[in-house]
Amino acid sequence: DGGITQSPKYLFRKEGQNVTLSCEQNLNHDAMYWYRQDPGQGLRLIYYSQIVNDFQKGDIAEGYSVSREKKESFPLTVTSAQKNPTAFYLCASTEGPGRAYQPQHFGDGTRLSIL
Amino acid sequence: GQQLNQSPQSMFIQEGEDVSMNCTSSSIFNTWLWYKQDPGEGPVLLIALYKAGELTSNGRLTAQFGITRKDSFLNISASIPSDVGIYFCAGQLTQSNYQLIWGAGTKLIIKP
């Protein structure tokens, strides 16, 4: 089945540690996105990538980094500079440019907590 | 940044009741999307709206793209227990490059 796979489901970070969240898609989608979700709030965009080897900052990119070396993969690193990393992280993808907007499809998320 | 005002924040309903929620903005949107999120999972697309005035149904769900392009509503008829969850609206601004603006969500709870 085609879809978006996020791993791990749960992740714990120690103080001063960088952690990397995985996002893989086999939908052949061009664009991929990372969102952060906090309780009672909507989704906030961290980074997005419309094509391999290119990515753009979203609204809350500070303390995060990404790479897009392959079309199917868009890992997110939560660095030690992100002082409040506890949240639910969601990865999404879309087909990319087209005549009509292509809705984003989501993975099942990674819940990151501080030890 | 840009925001969508989604209301109500939460709803307590009896099984079988109809539900209505909406999103408004001061900005004009090119596309409106409605998603549902179950606990611990990613949002799932329910309905996509692409034209002002468009009314689209998906089973018991009906959504409309406001004629002013600044609002949208979602109705659920004859609610059932599996309707419980958080419903999000999201919109694409006319001049944006595939970024979505998200509402804060409407939490639907069925009274026992």
Image: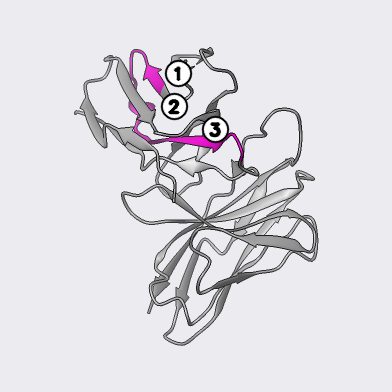
Q: Looking at this view, is B96 or A34 the one in front? A: B96
Dividing the picture into quadrants, the one containing residue B89 is top left
Q: Secondary structure at mark 2?
A: loop
Q: Secondary structure at mark 1?
A: loop
Q: Position of residue A95 (x, y in %)?
A: 74, 40
Disc 1 marks a residue whose amino acid type is Gly
Above or below, comparing residue A77 to residue A107 in the picture: below
| Few, some or many residues within 10 Å of mark 2 (<14, 14–19, 20+) | many
Above or below, comparing residue A11 to residue A24 in the picture: below
Do the residues indicated by labels 1 and 2 lie within the same chain of the protein?
yes
Q: Residue at x 45, y 18 (%)?
A: B66
| Few, some or many residues within 10 Å of mark 3 (<14, 14–19, 20+) | some
Q: Magenta segment range?
A: B73-95
Is A29 positioned to the left or the right of A19 in the image?
right
Q: CA distance from mark 1 to mark 2?
A: 6 Å
Q: Residue at x 54, y 32 (%)?
A: B45
Q: Residue at x 39, y 38 (%)?
A: B4
Disc 2 marks a residue whose amino acid type is Lys
Q: Position of residue B6 (x, y in %)?
A: 34, 34
Label 2: chain? Answer: B
Badge 1 vs badge 2, beta-carbon distance below 8 Å: yes
Which residue position holds label 2?
A: B70
Label 3: chain? Answer: B
Q: CA distance from mark 2 to mark 3?
A: 20 Å
Q: CA distance from mark 3 to mark 1?
A: 19 Å
* Residue A93 belongs to the span the image colors magenta: no
Which residue position holds label 1?
A: B66
Is B97 positioned to the left or the right of B70 in the image?
right
Which residue position holds label 3?
A: B45
Is B69 positioned to the left or the right of A26 in the image?
left
